[in-house]
Amino acid sequence: MSQTLEKTPVQEEKKEMLITFNKPYTFEGNSYTEVDLSPIENLTAEDLLEAEDVLAKSGVNAFVPEINFTYLMIVAANATGKPQEFFRKLPAKEGIKVKRAVMGFLNGEE
């Protein structure tokens, strides 16, 4: 008799925060097939304010930072500890995956 194990909402959310790349991405001599954004759950409001400061200092003016691509890449970098350049140099499709995941997390329902 086989049982179907259903995933809990926490497992589903963790899965959504693991971004799998369509093909390996090379950054600074290392090859990546995925990036785990789940540490975003540990960010504080202060972290988000610091990301807004970085955004403002970059010269980007965003009325609603939570939907601004640059801001979302800054948040992803802060959450993962990877340099912002890691996210800026992602292939476009992979960058959009990251953008959607971070935006979904920030704008998601509790």
Image (cartoon, rainbow, N blue to C red):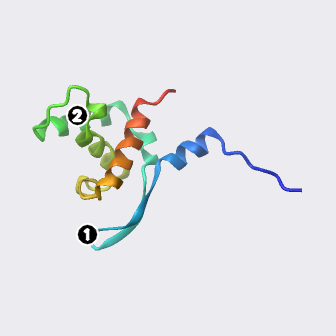
Q: Position of residue 82 (x, y in %)?
A: 31, 56
For image coordinates 67% across by 45% down, the residue present is 7
Q: Which mark is residue 72?
A: none
Distance of label 1 from label 2 (alpha carbons):
26 Å
In the picture provided, is 101 more to the left or to the right than 91?
A: right
- Helix, strand or loop at label 1? It is loop
Q: Residue at x 14, y 31 (%)?
A: 61
Amino acid type assigned to the residue bearing label 2 in the image: Glu
Dot 1 or dot 2: first in sequence order is 1
Which residue is the site of mark 1? Answer: 28
Q: Residues within 10 Å of mark 1 (few under 14, many from 20)?
A: few
**Residue 85 or 99: which is nearer the viewer?**
99
Residue 54 sits above or below residue 36 on the image: above
Q: What amino acid is found at the position of numbered circle 1 in the picture?
A: Glu
Contact, CB < 8 Å: mark 1 with mark 2?
Answer: no
Position in image of residue 80 (x %, y %): 37, 51
Disc 2: which residue: 52
Q: Looking at the rendering, in which quadrant would you find the N terminus?
A: bottom right
- The answer to which of 15 and 92 lies nearer the viewer is 92
Mark 2, secondary structure of its residue: helix
Identity of the residue furthest to the right in this view: 1
Q: Is residue 80 above or below residue 13?
A: below
Residue 64 percent location from the top left of the image? 25, 27
The tally of labels here is 2
* Residue 79 visible within the image: no
4 with respect to 95 (left or right): right
* Any part of residue 90 in sight: yes
Q: Nearer the viewer, residue 80 or 86?
A: 86
- Residue shown at 74% from the left, 49% from the top: 5
Q: Position of residue 62 (x, y in %)?
A: 19, 30
What residue is at 27 percent from the left and 44 percent from the top?
A: 74
| Residue sitting farthest toward the bottom | 29
